[in-house]
Amino acid sequence: MAITQLQKQAIVYQILSLTGVGPMRFWKEFHLTKNLEATYQAFRSRFNFTKLDEAIQEIQRFNEQSIACIGFWQDEYPKQLKRLHDVPPLIWAKGNLEFFHTPQIAIVGGRNASFHGIKFAKDISSALSDSGFTIVSGLARGIDKSAHQGALQNCTIAVLAGGVDKPYPQENAALYEELVQNHLVISEMPPGTEPIAELFPRRNRIIAGLSLGICVIEAASKSGSLLTAKYGLELGIPIFSCPGHPYDPRTKGSNMLIKDGASLLECAQDVLEQIQMPQMPVKHIEPAQHKQTKNTEKLSQEILNYLSHTPVKVDELLKNLAHYPTEQVLITLSELELNNAIYRPSANLIVLG
């Protein structure tokens, strides 16, 4: 009797939950038989498994939390990831799955980004997303955060190192909520997985695998962004790098990429001249927009009235706007920042733009 979709997902989930078993070992066994049930039996002969029903129930609980489990055999699975030599057998996702089937560009860079690096990342993200590309990044502070913010008016995908229910860092919690509501957050790690250091390189290969090109902004000499670029080179996709001052350690890696042959990145046109939109018609997907109610407009005006060119703590602002839900205030702050009405000199300070 044919096994169901859910049983297939549970089989792969159980195999990947085994200690020491990752994508490479899964595929090594699978390619011997080309049969999922036979692969399962091969692993069962060597490892102790819990009942399959328990894995099925876990996946169902995740589904109830709006977390989708997508197997490599399913139509929803992003086909571009199959270019990787260690294809993730499962992808976990929260948000709009249709974004998988749009043309994607990665924008990555340093966490300790400069003011100009953050502004450039946001501006180029906005321009590329307006040109029809979905922006892929890693939801880290600095360049990644700005890349997502620049594409909020269109489409963006965040790839996490831990589970899709484990946003990291916490300072990006409001942005994470925006992404799961109106965009897409994904991971190859199951829900509940903490984002430990060894998982970030795996996250970076997925960012590269999804993308038609990779833009690197302010990468230090040992930046994880260089690893993302390396994965991109292995896939044969274009790498673009924004130059930085030779005395700035934050840009040593991105300058090195240019020396090694990456394309100079100064504006969106540098990317658009090299990467053509796919010839097949791509359905443009509009994310759900926040309702522009009078209440939201009133909140925006109250924020602007409260601020000046002297920095104010976000916590202080929240106390003075306690008559609004905290999440609504944080989302409105993000929108005002995106529109350059306000500026954050640091994570907990804001001033008029």
Image: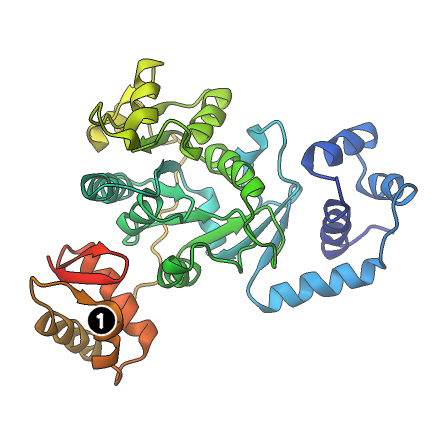
Query: Residue sitting at 19 percent across and 44 percent down?
Result: 115
Query: Residue sitting at 22 percent across and 74 percent down?
Result: 316
Tag count in the figure? 1
* Residue annotated with mark 1: 292
**Could you tell me if residue 292 is visible in this image?**
yes
On the rendered structure, is 127 left or right of 89?
left
On the rendered structure, is 17 left or right of 51?
left
Q: Where is residue 276 shown, x and y percent of the image?
A: 33, 27
On the rendered structure, is 192 left or right of 184?
right
- In the rendered view, would you say 63 is above or below 34? below
- In the rendered view, would you say 350 is above or below 148? below
Query: Residue sitting at 76 percent across and 29 percent down?
Result: 28
Indicate the quadrant where residue 135 lies.
top left
**Could you tell me if residue 275 is visible in this image?**
no
Q: Which sits in the foreground, 113 or 238?
A: 113
- In the rendered view, would you say 62 is above or below 266? below
Figure quadrant of the C terminus: bottom left
Q: Say which amino acid is labelled 1.
A: Gln
On the rendered structure, is 14 left or right of 102?
right
Q: Which sits in the foreground, 178 or 352?
A: 352
Query: Residue sitting at 22 percent across and 71 percent down?
Result: 292
Q: Where is residue 154 shown, x and y percent of the image?
A: 31, 51
Callout 1 environment at 10 Å: few (<14), some (14 to 19), or many (20+)?
few
Which residue occupies the extreme right position in the image? 45
Q: Where is residue 2 shown, x and y percent of the image?
A: 83, 50
> Disc 1 on helix, strand or loop?
loop
